[in-house]
Each structure stands twice: as C-alpha cells, then as structure tokens.
Image: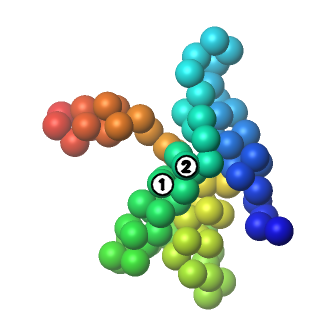
Amino acid sequence: MIHPSYTELMEVVNSEVEPGEQPVAQSRYSIVLATAKRARQLIAGSEPFVKDHGQKPLSIAVEELYNSKIKIVADDEEQQETHS
C-alpha cells in the first residue's frame, strides 16, 4: 500500500477549501498531475522542500504535497501568475 493514500492526499490538498467552494483536487488524476509536475521540477534541479533521504523525485513530491509544502493551483490561476 502506498502511504499516504490518494484519499489522504486529497484531504490534505482540499483542507483549506471553504464550505461550498470547489475542491482543488477532485480526483486521483489531479493528484497524479501535480506530483508528476513537481517531480519534473525536482529532476530539473529545484531544491526539495523536505529532506529527501535518498528518495526518488516522485516520492519527494508526494511527501511535499502531503506535508503542505506545495499547493495545487488551478490552471487559470497559474496562467495569471505567469502573465503578471
């Protein structure tokens, strides 16, 4: 079994969403996309926000997401940030 589970990751990611708002992560797919994108950043040389203990980039990305060191942003928010 993978720890943390997808369910646990989704709970952490959506923990700051106000009642009535759209959840940030609505499916496993959004979790997979976010962690894969962060893993690619780590492979490209970004510094991890957690101690890596010799872990692979994807494991580091999952740990960062679970520990709220990174956040998932909607595509429209990301585009606004890059164009500002």
Marks 2 and 1 in Cβ contact (< 8 Å)? yes
Q: Residue furthest right?
A: 1
Q: Is residue 68 visible?
A: no
| Mark 2 lies on residue | 29
Viewer-closest of 41 and 27:
27
**Regarding mark 1 in the picture, which secondary structure is present there?**
helix
Q: Dividing the picture into quarters, in which one does residue 4 lie?
A: bottom right
Is any part of residue 65 visible from this angle? yes
Q: Which amino acid type is marked by label 2? A: Tyr
Residue 19 horizontal/vertical position (percent) = 68, 15
Three-letter amino acid code of the residue under disc 1: Leu
Residue occupying image coordinates x 58% and y 38%: 25
Q: Is residue 68 left or right of residue 5?
A: left
Q: Is residue 19 above or below residue 42?
A: above
The image shows residue 27 at horizontal and vertical percentages of: 61, 41
The numbered dot on residue 33 is: 1
Q: x and y percent of residue 45 in the render?
A: 35, 77
Q: At numbered mark 2, what does the secondary structure look like: helix, strand or loop?
A: helix
